[in-house]
Image (spheres, helix red, strand yellow):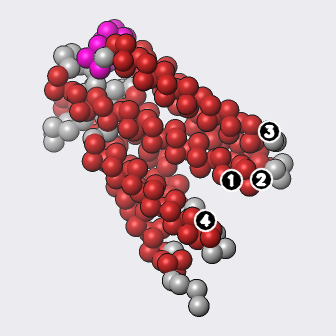
Amino acid sequence: MNLPTKITFTRIIMIILMIITLFVLSVINGFNHWQTFELGNTGINLVFLILFIFFVIASYTDHLDGYLARKNNQVTDLGKFLDPVADKLLINSLVIFLAAPSVFAPYIPGELNQVGFSVWCVIILVARDIVVDALRFIGASKGKVIAANIFGKLKTVLEMVAIGIVLLNGFPFRYFDASWPIGLHIADIFVYLATAASLISGIIYVVQNRHVFKEDK
């Protein structure tokens, strides 16, 4: 196992530990006690801040392992398999977790958890990944490679930005929400942009690679 693959594998272990930790904290504290970790009047949750720092590090290692693999000519089949698995675990696990504040928000006092991923956004984000991964699987079974395109990369960037902003409870944009003319959190706009980019990129993937559905003669 070379260095880039070790970095990817380590990221997967960290993500699994993160998910377990969040589950344990949710059980111990309950969603209605997250506000006890608020940092002053910032609206930022201490647990979510730590999670944000971890998310930034994990996102950077996603870039780092790919860069090292290409630079040192260490691209392997194992690395190709583990890297997208790590990406999906990181993003999808977080958007599912961050949907919980938006579901329980009406029952939570205080200023925390005002922004989050709606359930419908999460369904679109996860469903898109399932469809694209299935498409790649069909293509691979026929010896056809479905490469990532600019739309997929844009979708990933917007997802990471949206997740980061939601983890910080809309900071620093939350200070402008009161003067925002349409009564919508600015953080929510980033969530909707990421969702739209995900949906559009998924449609483009299917349209551009529809040939994989043709039966071989």
**What residue do we see at 25% from left, 17% from top?**
32
| Residue count near mark 4 (Cα–Cα under 10 Å), binned few <14, some 14–19, many ≥20 | few
User: In the image, which disc is placed on residue 80?
Assistant: 1
Camera-nearest label, 2 or 4: 2
Q: Quadrant of the N terminus?
A: top right
**What residue do we see at 52% from left, 59% from top?**
133
Whether label 2 touches label 3, CB < 8 Å: no
Of the numbered discs 2 and 3, the one sitting upstream in the chain is 3
Q: In this picture, which residue range is highlighted in magenta?
A: 31-43
Determine the secondary structure under disc 1.
helix
Whether label 1 touches label 2, CB < 8 Å: yes
Mark 2 → mark 4, Cα distance in angstroms:
16 Å
Image side of residue 162 versus residue 7, left or right? left
Q: Which residue is mark 2?
A: 76
Image side of residue 174 versus residue 78, left or right? left
Q: Which residue is mark 3?
A: 3
User: In the image, which disc is placed on residue 217?
Assistant: none
Q: Which residue is mark 4?
A: 147
Q: Position of residue 63 (x, y in %)?
A: 64, 43
